[in-house]
Image (spheres, rainbow, N blue to C red):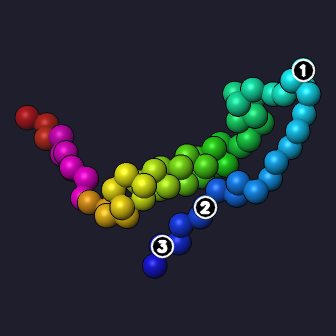
Amino acid sequence: MKTISRVNRKIIRKEKLEKVNTDFTYWQTKSYQERLSALESIREEYNSWEYDNKQRFQRVYKIIKR
């Protein structure tokens, strides 16, 4: 059984505009694995909104050398 992790949206921080980092600098501080994990959770969350949790088969292509 696959578990779906959700994004914690309860943390709120107030900072001065001069000190606010951009999204790019934030994600640059994260490891490769953390970025992929966040991307996968965003993808799962989007699919649950868009397709109502109905996973479908993806197309599979096979390259044949002639």
The residue that appears at 53% across and 49% down in the rendered structure is 42
Q: Nearer the viewer, residue 26 or 48?
A: 48
The residue that appears at 75% across and 26% down in the rendered structure is 22
Numbered disc 1: secondary structure: helix
Q: Nearer the viewer, residue 64 or 15?
A: 15
**Which residue corresponds to mark 2?**
6
- As measured in the structure, the alpha-carbon distance from the residue carrying label 2 to the one carrying label 1 is 30 Å
Q: Residues within 10 Å of mark 1 (few under 14, many from 20)?
A: few
Q: Position of residue 66 (x, y in %)?
A: 8, 35
Q: Residues within 10 Å of mark 3 (few under 14, many from 20)?
A: few
The count of marks equals 3
**Which residue corresponds to mark 3?**
2
Q: Main secondary structure of the magenta part?
A: loop
Numbered disc 3: secondary structure: loop
Decide if residue 22 is on the left or right side of residue 60.
Answer: right
- As measured in the structure, the alpha-carbon distance from the residue carrying label 2 to the one carrying label 3 is 13 Å
Task: Give the numbered dot on residue 56.
Answer: none
**Which of the two discs, 1 and 3, labels the residue nearer the N terminus?**
3
Indicate whether residue 58 is drawn in magenta. yes
Going by the numbered disc 2, the residue's amino acid type is Arg
The image shows residue 14, relative to residue 2, as above or below, that is: above
The residue that appears at 70% across and 30% down in the rendered structure is 23
Q: Position of residue 64 (x, y in %)?
A: 13, 41
**Which residue corresponds to mark 1?**
18
Q: Residues within 10 Å of mark 2 (few under 14, many from 20)?
A: few
Q: Nearer the viewer, residue 6 or 57?
A: 6
- As measured in the structure, the alpha-carbon distance from the residue carrying label 1 to the one carrying label 3 is 42 Å
Numbered disc 2: secondary structure: loop
The residue that appears at 61% across and 49% down in the rendered structure is 38
Going by the numbered disc 3, the residue's amino acid type is Lys
Residue segment shown in magenta: 57-63
Q: Which of the 4 image quarters holds residue 29? A: top right
